[in-house]
Amino acid sequence: MRLPETLRIGILTLFQPQEVTLAAGSRPATLHLDERPVALPPGRLCRVAKDAGGLALWQGERRLAIGTHLAVAAEDVTVEVTGRRTRLRRHFCGTLTVTPGEKHLQLVVTQPPEAVVAAVVSAELSPEAPSEAAKALAVVVRSYLVNHVGRHAGQGFDFCDSTHCQLFFGEQWARWEAGRETGGALSGLGKQAAADTQGEVLWEADGGLSDAYYTACCGGRTTTPAVAFGMGQDSTTATGVRCRWCREARFFAWMRRVDRRTLARALLPELAATESWNIAVAGRTPDGFVTSLVVQAGSRQITLPNYRFRHLVGQRLGWNLVLSNRYAIEPHGEWLVLRGQGFGHQVGLCLAGAIAQAQAGRHYRDILRHYFPKSACHNALQTDF
């Protein structure tokens, strides 16, 4: 297996827009709607909206054209989407396509994999992060891309832009929410890390690609995909490792609390009317990672896999409540207190630990050997897997 020449990234996938705005920059943009060119002068914008199973281009109240497939050089336009409380603006390189999905518009950016690697590193790390940490992340990102290409093939692209796959914001991004603006841009750090490790992926001793992941902070120990995601059997190299490097990180240890009834509604709506119910950790790995929980309500007992518990809580109460896979649940009257370690799924490269190792002068390949002790770097541009 070699690196593909281009990757298709589904963008704004969590936002699921019904319409988007495309704004031309300092030069004119040419939108190709079903191969028909539509000119967009410099500084002008148009709306792309779903229309009777197709697409419609609008300027103000004037409909410019209708069709089923729009393509444009991504460098020539800025994409903006507005929701009830949030507004996003993104700029990309490569080719941008817009098609009508079943329920919302589908936007896909196609670009070379090294551009994707640079963008993901830029989204995940501060521009001031140590270069060796960025290079380690670049190798892990590229390994994931090669190993999981086509993950969303049934939806018409290879990867989504959320943490379900990898965080991808493009060349420049801005977000307005609750009166505050945040944003960023493709960093020199991200571009240099991709260039310095061009083509490098993690290769397992048995001759296959490593199933590489990364996490914000492992909390002292990493785990395996099987534990974190409920994926069944691990590969021969998917073993967790100890990490002393992230102990000064913000989320090495954490505490959260939640109202019992609120949690009940999130897990099983019928529990909200039950006065007496309990939840407890039912299963752990020998190194402390939660594998399952048990909910007891009267004579009824329900066992939830940990990944299902975190998914339900995250979807309905926010992803900032159960931060990791290592935690304890303590009852305190009408409240439940969760105390845990780490932030994220805790699989693979620990970003907080990688930064600390780089600051201590360690080379990126030494960092990778620490978190992937049975894997080695090989160049996918020169090697068939």
Image (tube, helix red, strand yellow):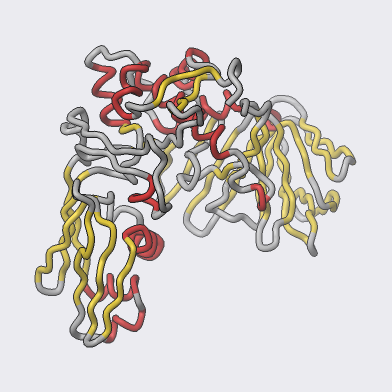
Image quadrant in which you'd find residue 138: top left
Residue at left offset 48%, top offset 39%? 167
Residue at left offset 48%, top offset 13%? 196
Residue at left offset 36%, top offset 58%? 307
Judge by depth and name the residue closer to the eye, 235 or 298: 235
Q: Is residue 183 above or below residue 256?
A: above
Taking the image as shown, residue 226 lies to the left or right of residue 25, namely left
Quadrant where the N terminus sits is top right
Judge by depth and name the residue closer to the eye, 346 or 314: 346
Image quadrant in which you'd find residue 269: bottom left
Image quadrant in which you'd find residue 199: top right
Judge by depth and name the residue closer to the eye, 361 or 377: 377
Taking the image as shown, residue 293 lies to the left or right of residue 121, namely left
Residue 365 spot, x, y in % from top left: 36, 17
Taking the image as shown, residue 158 lies to the left or right of residue 305, namely right
Q: Is residue 84 above or below residue 204?
A: below
**Number of marks present in the image shown:** 0
Residue at left offset 58%, top offset 42%? 159
Residue 4 spot, x, y in % from top left: 66, 29
Taking the image as shown, residue 322 lies to the left or right of residue 26, namely left
Residue 379 spot, x, y in % from top left: 53, 17
Q: Residue furthest left?
A: 332
